[in-house]
Amino acid sequence: MKKYLVKAAIFLGISVLQLALVYVVLRFFVFSSPVESSALEETKGKPVSQDSITTTGTQSPIDQLLRQEDEEDRIDLKQLDKKSMLQMDNLVINPSDTRGKKFLVISLTIYLNTTIISEPGSAEEIAVKDAIITLLARKSLYWIINIDNRPILREELKKTVQGVLKEPKPPKIFITKFVLQ
């Protein structure tokens, strides 16, 4: 009888360790990215307005990033110039961990600050499209599905487009279609 209790205790201990390992892998490798932590680090040290404080008196870094994004994306639509608008319709991307069995269809409207895209199919447009597809193809399915990652994704897209076009200020990006199949 004692032999069975020892075996059961060992089995239970191994099971608990496996669950802990699965939690760590999912938490830190599947649902996390280096950009998420860098985007959250950017919000640290910035003043928080009185209306952004929740009832508990603190605000999570994700909430701060969302509020900051909302304030930055408030634009006057009349000031937008069609020449500085870049429309990316129906980009099809296979997330990194799906082996081609799932795909994301995304459409974006990008308002640039200084760069003017001369015509559809220009070198600038092709470079931006390639960079966006590369960025999205590196994301896992579970990262893409997580709605909390949407502001982080938008920030990554802004930095990617800004880097490709060498814009002095980040562009405004609107996700107009987001379909995961």
Image (cartoon, rainbow, N blue to C red):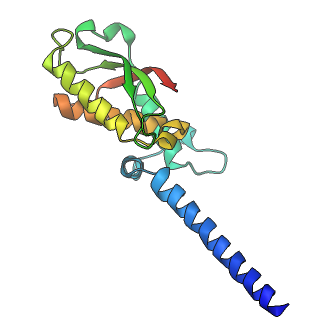
Number of on-image labels:
0
User: Where is 57 relative to 14, above or below?
Assistant: above
Q: Who is closer to the viewer here, 34 or 51?
A: 34
Give the residue displayed 61% in from the left and 51% down from the top.
Answer: 57
Residue 92 left/right relative to 18:
left
User: Where is 87 relative to 164, above or below?
Assistant: above
Can the viewer see residue 49 in this picture? Answer: no
> Quarter holding the N terminus?
bottom right
Q: Who is closer to the viewer here, 76 or 62?
A: 62
Instruction: Report the residue that reaches farthest toward the right.
Output: 1
Can the viewer see residue 12 in this picture? Answer: yes
Residue 121 left/right relative to 89:
left
**Residue 62 rendering spot, x and y as whole percentages:** 50, 44
Give the residue displayed 40% in from the left and 25% down from the top.
Answer: 73
**Residue 79 rendering spot, x and y as whole percentages:** 31, 10
Residue 14 left/right relative to 152:
right
Give the residue displayed 62% in from the left and 44% down from the top.
Answer: 54
Q: Who is closer to the viewer here, 16 or 65?
A: 16
**Residue 13 rendering spot, x and y as whole percentages:** 67, 78
User: Where is 157 relative to 56, above or below?
Assistant: above
**Residue 104 rendering spot, x and y as whole percentages:** 45, 28
